[in-house]
Image: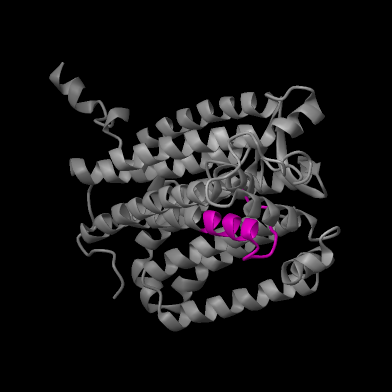
Amino acid sequence: MSELALQIPRTRVMSFDPVLGSVLVVLLSIGYVAMASASVEFAQMEYQNPLHHMQRHGVYLIIALAAGVVAFQIPLESLRRHGWWLLLLGIAMLSLVLLLGREVNGSKRWLALGPFTLQVSEFVKLIVVVYMAGYLVRRQDQVRSRLGGFLKPLAVMVVLIVLLLAEPDFGAAVVMMGAVMGMLFLGGARLWQFMALVGVCALAAGAMVMTSEYRMQRMLAYTSPWDHQFGISYQLVQALIAFGRGEWFGVGLGNSVQKLSYLPEAHTDFVFAILAEEMGAVGVILVLALFAVLIARMLLVARQAERRGFCFGAYLSYGAALLIALQVFINVGVNTGILPTKGLTLPFFSYGGSSLITCVMLVALVGRVELTLRDGDAAFEAEGCGKQ
């Protein structure tokens, strides 16, 4: 009996990091209320049921929490060993989307699964972080000392980005590449290599904008929104009006005017603008502070893992924190007009199950790293994993 007890994993849901867990629950709760409020009018118009999105998002929330529990139970060593297989699965899924995917507004990003749809690119983000964390452990010396070690994962990223741009999903490609670049830099890549990569990515992004009419239109909307307020800048202008109406304390929960068909599909990419209108600057600052605490805690776990030589856990946590931080930065930047308009969800807030499930799983994996450090049951790498 005692031998059997020793074989049972020590991981327990109640052992989840209290800081990560508390902030995650608060963000999910506020996000659910904000999304429900923002979706009422659209749901009534489209489905004759004002609670349509609220009910479906509630189901997504339950699935996301269940997926988080599963991710928390997965042995990290198993993830490290099977990163390549997960990457191949991600490539296969992106290819399947192009063949059998459901097209919405000119983009083919979703696989239909009965009454639900799966946005594959969201899960591929998680897969890329797991793969890169494993690669940086296996090829640590090569990444730090050889150009080939730096370029190999970028070749893999080219394949993924080509598939994403074929959908097209420019936002997912930017976030994924940003996370990979950050992980390579934290993994010890030489500064000149990193800066050269930044330059190449900037030139490539500029070329993609210049050669795409709809991306050029978005850049035009970004540079002079009020000149095109009834045309290409309509959505951004309505979002800015929402921020202006919110002032310090907002117009009150449920009292948004912009969600009444002025701001199209406000429950998805522009839910933050409705939150600002209803909760004001105080509510916005609170939400951003919660995101800051969550990301800071994830980075702290990564740093602790790095100091103790748990390289895979460190890189996995760094990648998860970078993914969430980049999505928050881009979504908030788009909502406030700081960045060009781009379809990208706000973690834990925007309507949609794929993003919600992926983000919860990312936090759960960092929680597993923290528990591993606390229990001291990992075979840590003696050489450490910081930059040379």
Colour treatment of the image? one colour
First to last magenta residue range: 326-345
Q: Quadrant of residue 175?
A: bottom right
Indicate whether residue 47 is drawn in magenta.
Answer: no
Question: Which residue appears farthest toward the bottom when viewing the image?
Answer: 192
Q: Is residue 228 above or below residue 167?
A: below
Quadrant into which the N terminus falls = top left
Q: Quadrant of residue 9?
A: top left
Q: Is residue 311 above or below residue 55?
A: below
Indicate whether residue 329 is drawn in magenta.
Answer: yes
Question: Which residue appears farthest toward the top when viewing the image?
Answer: 1
Position of 67 with respect to 112 (left or right) is left
Answer whether residue 64 is visible to the viewer in this image.
yes
Position of 62 with respect to 6 (left or right) is right
Q: Position of residue 104 (x, y in %)?
A: 80, 43
Q: Position of residue 2 (x, y in %)?
A: 13, 20
Residue nearer the viewer, 361 or 376: 361
